[in-house]
Amino acid sequence: MDIIDKLTEVFKEFPGIGERQAKRFVYFLMSRSPAYNENVCGLIADLKKEVAQCKECFRFFIKNEKAHSQSSVSAICDICGNVNTDSSLLMVVEKDSDLESVKKSRIYGGKYFILGGLVPIVEKSTKSRVRIEELKEKIKREEKNDLKEIILAFSLSPQGDHTDSYVREQIKDTAEKLNIKVSSLGKGLSTGTELEYSDNDTLKNALKNRQ
Ligand SMILES: [Zn+2]
């Protein structure tokens, strides 16, 4: 495998990128100056240094200056750590970009949890793919913050539906015992809608009509 093939393989692992696009990225980088490529490498290398993952919701966030200089990692994000966040609501989403879309729409003021993926319909080792155990722990912890409702917000697709059923089944006992309602946002979206690309009105309706 030469360097072109190796780099193509790397880009092919990126979400939504196929062989042809991956190759185009490689040829693009070949046409750029060494300084440009070094800058790209530097940014990639710094990404993990400047970003932390919230231990409550698992979202990635930029560490603030203070946490940075203290070298102690601030592992709670500005949503989980904010006293104004409505702790009676917990929205479970697939990925970071879904959370960002809902956050930007300003229609929801509750807490979040990032599941880390959807559950494939044919899947044997589900538990290793999504944060279901972490979610159960989170629900138990949130009980003392007066958690009233868990909103499952996955894309309205066969895989999204499957994930919805899977998570419901998994958290059923815990939620029942703690008297927490479980609802789904996906039902308010139109078929095939990705949460990430939903506009404000769609999200607002989906939130209002959750069931
Ligand atoms: Zn958080």
Image: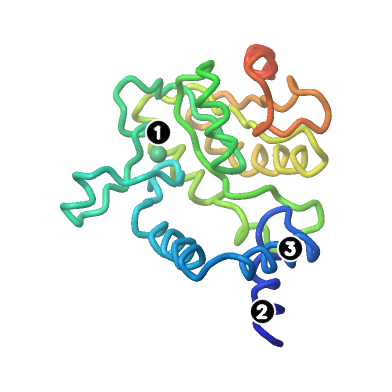
Q: CA distance from mark 1 to mark 2?
A: 45 Å
Q: Is residue 139 above or below residue 103?
A: below
Report whether the residue tagged 3 is closer than 8 Å to ligand 1: no
Q: Nearer the viewer, residue 172 or 210?
A: 210
Q: CA distance from mark 2 to mark 3?
A: 13 Å
Q: Which mark is residue 24?
A: 3
Q: Nearer the viewer, residue 151 or 85?
A: 85
- Quadrant where the N terminus sits is bottom right
Q: Which residue appears farthest toward the left when viewing the image?
A: 70
Q: Earlier in the sequence, mark 1 or mark 3?
A: 3
Q: Residue at x 61, y 36 (%)?
A: 172
Q: Closer to us: mark 1 or mark 2?
A: 2
Q: Is residue 49 above or below residue 147?
A: below
Q: Is residue 96 left or right of residue 195?
A: left
Q: Secondary structure at mark 1?
A: helix
Q: Secondary structure at mark 2?
A: helix
Q: CA distance from mark 1 to mark 3?
A: 47 Å
Q: Which mark is residue 125?
A: none
Residue 168 picture location, percent across and down: 66, 37
What is the number of callouts on the image? 3
Q: Is residue 171 above or below residue 73?
A: above
Give the amino acid at mark 2. Answer: Lys
Q: Which residue is mark 1?
A: 142
Q: Earlier in the sequence, mark 2 or mark 3?
A: 2
Q: Which residue is mark 2?
A: 6
- Mark 2 closeness class: few <14, some 14–19, many ≥20 residues within 10 Å: few
Residue 65 picture location, percent across and down: 23, 45
Give the amino acid at mark 1. Answer: Glu
